[in-house]
Amino acid sequence: MKKSGFTLAEVLITMGIVGVIAALTTPTLITSSRNQANAAKLSSAISVMENALTSLVISEGTDDIVDTELWNYWEDANGFAEEIGKYLKIISYKYADSTIPEGYSEIKTVNGTSLKAMPNMDGQFISLTLPSGAVAFLAESGDALTTAEEETAAAAGGALFSCPAYLTIDVNGIEAPNRVGRDIFCFIVGPDGKLYPYGGKDVAIFKGGSATSTWNSDSGTYPCTDTTKGNGEGCTARLMEENFKMNY
């Protein structure tokens, strides 16, 4: 009676096919998993930073963050860390300038173009390492709209009329991939301490006066319709608007 079953050759061929499929799909699965982990880390980091900054404004009884005690310490790293430490737990802090921060070998845009500096940072800025491993980079800014520009911005539905500081969050510090839109994300800190993402309506109006120059506009300043368009800064708003699902 003939026995049924697989020959050794058939088993080896099957194993080879499975191995090829695994080799093709595993890198994609790893990348997807890493992207979603970084998206979740960003959600947490936004909550931590925004809670700290809005608490700072409220506790000092002001409606503009530039009127808080913290704003007196931009030239004093120790004083800055001590003051913000009242509202935000930090592991370490240091000053940097407009180059690649210490510890980073390279920073790239979402489409792979190398950058010469941390995005959204200009001149001197301070970095704050959080307990989660995320690093928040803050640079003071005095940018503000004129009265006429404020009226235009308000008419367009914007809520941002001045930019006290720029904020960039790297959700996993110096760990890879160090790409804008993947683990590095850009914001404007509003007077109220709230974070306004690049690629969002408020930043689009503040920066260019147009409510349509957002992440989903290829003709806008910060597009993020796919990874071949823009530098990835606008992906911050896309990620937030799509419930922290990295669909790009």
Image (cartoon, helix red, strand yellow):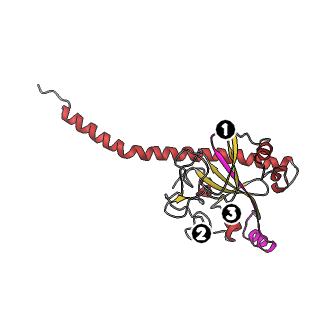
Q: Label 3 sits on what residue type?
A: Val
How many labels were placed on the picture?
3
Nearer-the-camera pick, 106 or 18 = 106
| Position of residue 159 in the picture relative to residue 221 (left or right) | right
Kindly report the distance in space between the C-alpha atoms of the residues bearing marks 1 and 3. 29 Å
For marks 1 and 2, the one nearer the N-term is 1
Kindly report the distance in space between the C-alpha atoms of the residues bearing marks 3 and 2. 12 Å
Q: Residue 131, labelled with which disc? A: 1
**Range of the magenta residues?**
130-159
* Spot occupied by residue 162 in the image (x, y as percentages of width and height): 77, 63
Contact between marks 1 and 2 (CB within 8 A): the answer is no
Tell me which residue sits at (40%, 43%) in the image.
26
Q: Residues within 10 Å of mark 1 (few under 14, many from 20)?
A: few
Kindly report the distance in space between the C-alpha atoms of the residues bearing marks 1 and 2. 36 Å
Q: Residues within 10 Å of mark 3 (few under 14, many from 20)?
A: many
Contact between marks 1 and 3 (CB within 8 A): the answer is no
Element at label 3: helix
Tell me which residue sits at (23%, 35%) in the image.
12
Identify the image quadrant of residue 23: top left
* Spot occupied by residue 226 in the image (x, y as percentages of width and height): 50, 61
Q: Label 2 sits on what residue type?
A: Gly
Element at label 2: loop
Identify the image quadrant of residue 41: top right
Name the residue that disc number 3 marks: 203
Name the residue that disc number 2 marks: 220
Identify the image quadrant of residue 159: bottom right
